[in-house]
Amino acid sequence: MRFNSEKTKNFFLILSWALYDLANQFFALNVVSLYFVRWLTLERQAPEILYSVAFGISTFFVAISAPVLGAISDISTRRRPFLIYLTLLSIIFTMVLGISKNIFLGLLFFMIANYGCQTAIVFYNALMVNITPSKRVGLVSGFGKMMGYTGAVLALYLIKPIVLKSGYQATFLPTGLLFLIFSLPCLIFIKDKPPLKKLEFFSFLKKDRVLGFFKTLRTTLFDTYNFPGLSDFLKSAFFGLCAVNTVILFMSVYATRAFGLNEAEVINLITFSTLFALAGSLFSGFISDYLGHKRALVAVFILWGVCFWLGTSIRNAHLYWFIGALLGIALGSTWVVSRAMAVSIVPAEKIGGVFGLFNLVGYLSAIVGALFWGVMLLFFSRFGEWGYRITLLSLILFILLGFIFLLRIPEVSVNPVRKDAGAVTKRFSNGVKNKKEDMAK
């Protein structure tokens, strides 16, 4: 009975944590990928480069703050407060989007909401180690993304009547409310582990404590980045996510421009793709735990290359459903395998730092990808549909670069079970110590 009670408690915590993946999909899909960009470019006739720049500015601030905040959370062992405050920031400004008629004011509100949502993910990911057995990282990560894509389906169908009746802007207020409702279980029930030593915030106000804090912060980030295999993983993630994040941002506009889909058809296609993303999230977790995270990620990169090639070359009005299915599988698998791989490379005490760095390269890649897409269309939009197809095909370059760095990651660094974690950590610590002694000399 005791065993069953403990299992029930663990499942409840995992479910509560995973519901946040469901919740933030309301923002990620309805605001970032679908209705805000369509409100801006199709309804208000603003150029796509304007959205690219706004998204780039927002993610730039995420990029420079996420590693620092992640390292602070490691030092203080407090991740939950960051998650709560940043989530509420995103929710509030998502709702405010629904009342702004000015394009530039809307872009400002979007940037703030996007900053809150994307930065909060650092701490949501880091809290996974508090509830996940080491041998089930891929499975729990996959369950979280499966819930996320379930949220995407809910977001599409719950908001679809609103957008068809009242337009794009009417979707933002209910999106914020749904984001709040589904995030509450995670915000309430997922707790930080008790720190080994209580950290008093006001002690930072003393000069020597401030200097000591930033010295510790620098050391934490340095040690985390130099962990075996992590630098190549982050480089691979950067180039791969340049392409992936660009697809997320502009897939709905591409479907309209390249395939001529109307509003209802775009929603149906994204729903169809999301169902495959849901399946890909779950099964890729099993596969990565069984075959290894590196091998699974290699397969995901190859699948992305196939998606871009088909999305560029196919013009048949019915075959876009096939492309949507492959795209959904690739998208769902990307985050599951990448998150599990990041967890497997470093020990638990460095997990906040690694997710800070992972989000740093992820958001830098989003800036580069969004600006790349916008600049390419400035030159090729004169060619109409083919301008969009050429721009999509050019994203294969990012996939190839990421693939090269992925192959350089040592197999021992991504052992799914990490039986060698203690030995690797010890060797790494000795290596860092020796480097520091050599630098001192």
Image (spheres, rainbow, N blue to C red):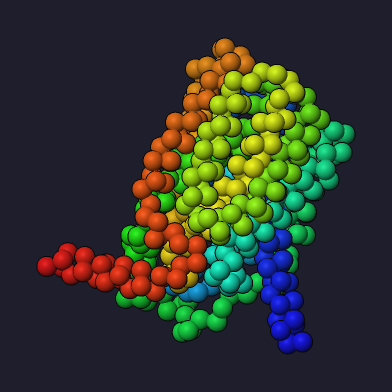
Residue plotted at (78% across, 42% down)? 156
Q: Residue furthest top?
A: 383
| Residue drawn where x is 77% and y is 87% of the image | 1
Q: Is residue 36 above or below residue 48?
A: below
Say whether residue 295 is left or right of residue 127: left
Residue located at (39% from left, 46% from top): 407
Q: Tell me which corner region of the image, top left, top right, bottom left or bottom right, holds residue 55.
A: top right
Work out whether 40 lies above or below 179: above
Check the image and report above or below for 315 versus 249. Answer: above
Where's residue 360, x and y in %?
Answer: 46, 51
Q: Position of residue 239 (x, y in %)?
A: 44, 40
State the image quarter where residue 252 is shown: top right
Task: Name the quarter where the C terminus is drawn.
Answer: bottom left
Q: With 70 as the anchor, is 230 left or right in this view? A: left
Whether residue 411 is visible, yes or no, is: yes
| Residue nearer the viewer, 252 or 417 | 417
Residue 440, position in %: x, y?
A: 16, 68
**Picture quadrant of residue 83:** bottom right
